[in-house]
Amino acid sequence: MADVTTNPAPRIIDGPRGRKPTRALSGRNIMIYGTLIVVALYYLLPLYVMVVTSLKGMPEIRMGNIFAPPVEITFQPWVKAWAEACTGLNCDGLSRGFWNSVQITVPSVFLSIAIASLNGYALANWRFKGANIFFTILIIGAFIPYQVMLYPIVILLREAGLYGSLTGLIIVHTIFGMPILTLLFRNYFSSVPEELFKAARVDGAGFWGIYFRIMLPMSLPIFVVAMILQVTGIWNDFLFGVVYTRPENYPMTVQLNNIVNSVQGVKEYNVNMAATLLTGLVPLIIYFISGKLFVRGIAAGAVKG
Amino acid sequence: MSTRPSRLFHNMNAKIASVPMVLTAMVVFLGGSIWTVVYSFTDSKLLPREKWVGLDQYERLWGTNRWLVSIENLAIYGVLSLIFSLVIGFVLAALMDQKIRFEDVFRTIFLYPFALSFIVTGLVWQWLLNPDFGVQNVIRGIGFESFTFDPLYDADLAIYGILFAGLWQGTGLVMCLMLAGLRGIDEDIWKAARVDGIPAWKTYLFIVIPMMRPVFITTLVIITAGIVKLYDLVVAQTGGGPGIATEVPAKYVYDMMFQAQNLGQGFAASTMMLVSVIIILIPWAYLEFGGKRRG
């Protein structure tokens, strides 16, 4: 049982065991597949509604029903959401938020993974006195509500002259990604056979040599898992974006919320849904491409300790 | 060995590599939390200041209707989303574990909402539950003229509208964790139960679920940690409305700190959030680590 709690992912990936079912149509199978299909339709419904709404014109939306496929397909809402939708005084659409999010996500992902993998490596193979105390505090920190640390970080960033800038937000993402990523890398590096490590030591490789020549090339899958975890997590962040950046630097999620929930003007539901889809597109694409690695990522991300 | 200048420089590279971790743990996590708790005893307004007022902020907090509503909402949302996501997640996992075909397809569908942000989730469900165009309108359109389903505009029901969206987003994850747990159960146990003629539902209820206790506890902790952080979903879906019907503690903290310029209140409210998490975590840590020591 112990390994189930610490590392459930491979079990999922292994798939079911035993023979394939032989009879296709039995009462039991109809019940099982029936339930699963109904639930699956329920899960797909919001995605479907987003897509069809974003392809309709406003007159059609006012007349008809949200589940009906568009009579006349128009891409105008997508164009408008991307390039023209207004937030406050800016009317250059979500594209601004998209590029902000790219500028935030790319460096945050690299920085947080670089730092956390080195941390995990030091913790797994070069443990020094007191290291585990810091690590324990780090892991406990993952459970502290962010709200408790919001303002102290505002002060730290202000002192450093980074409050409101993209750099500040990148540092914040690096900090809050550290607990889970460090845990991920520490556990992975711990499982690398010690003989390998000792052999490299005998051959004269030091801390950095072993990291770059042995650990890094051996651990590419875990780096991919960490990347998936971080890209989706940082892209989907709202709280840090709204607290630590100025309006012109707002990430996509914050800008999306401002566009859709703005009180001025007539509500354009098709533009709203196109904007929502655009924001969800990046994590969705990562999800569908990465498949089982994503499952491994969230299992690692979810199962702390 | 004797050439080493001092113990401090022993294993120097590892220490250098750990500087960010040490800083994060000590300065941000530990230092930041202590700082917030300490300043919750001041009357800080726009900027933090050291004018100590004892427990005044807490008295004001617990005398504020909006905070009480927030706590009540979080309790309703928390209890129901725990129950529903565990039950639905487990049932789905049990169905998925019947050696079915297309398992990958089903899993992909159940899990994709988890890849989406709470903002996206909230906005989609805001649209689906829109009384003029959404589900209510569609069902009225097919003949049920008096059908009413507009949870987001009814103060008594709004929090359940948020629960709907939250469950849609998070149940897939619970299903995945449960499925992993089920796959960890020894197949021989199923065989033994079948030999003894125990019906499947009884095997699940009295044998499998008790065996999956560690998985349930881990899942419980994950869901709970997520519930306390509930913020983006509310902001996107209802903005706390109608009125204050869907306010939550995390939103109270943000609004006090960054909108109402009432830092002291924000610190006190966030300290209460910290206390609640500690109350949840201590029994879990005790069960998890105390149990290991015994076994």
Image (spheres, helix red, strand yellow):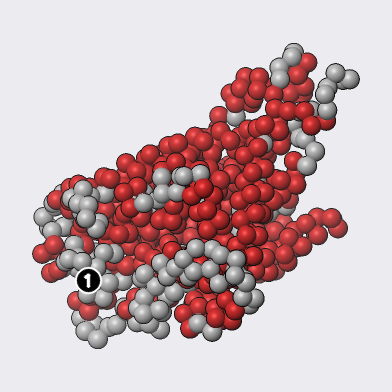
Q: Is residue A137 left or right of residue B180?
A: right
Total labels drawn: 1
Pointer 1: residues within 10 angstroms few (<14), some, or many (20+)?
some
Residue at far bottom of view = B146
Q: Which residue is mark 1?
A: B133
Between B181 and A81, the one lying in front of the other is A81
Q: Position of residue B159 (x, y in %)?
A: 43, 76
Residue at far right of view = B2
Q: Is residue B278 left or right of residue A237?
A: right
Q: Residue at x 41, y 67 (%)?
A: B259
Q: Work out whether residue B211 can be spotted.
A: no
Residue at far top of view = A203
Q: Is residue B87 left or right of residue A288?
A: right
Q: Residue at x 51, y 44 (%)?
A: A160
Q: Position of residue A93 (x, y in %)?
A: 23, 50
Q: Residue at x 24, y 82 (%)?
A: B144
Q: Is residue A39 above or below residue B100?
A: below
Between A6 and B120, the one lying in front of the other is B120
Between A302 and A161, the one lying in front of the other is A161
Q: Position of residue A194 (x, y in %)?
A: 76, 27
Between B7 and B187, the one lying in front of the other is B7
Q: Residue at x 46, y 45 (%)?
A: A162
Quarter of the image where one finds residue B217: bottom right
Kind of residue at disc 1: Phe
Q: Position of residue A261 (x, y in %)?
A: 29, 64
Quarter of the image where one finds residue A69: bottom left
Q: Is residue B66 above or below residue B104?
A: below
Q: Is residue B106 above or below residue A116?
A: below
Q: Provide the chain ID for the residue under circle 1.
A: B
Task: Give the structural element (helix, strand or loop) at label 1.
Answer: loop
Q: Work out whether residue B238 can be spotted.
A: yes
Q: Is residue A248 left or right of residue A70?
A: right
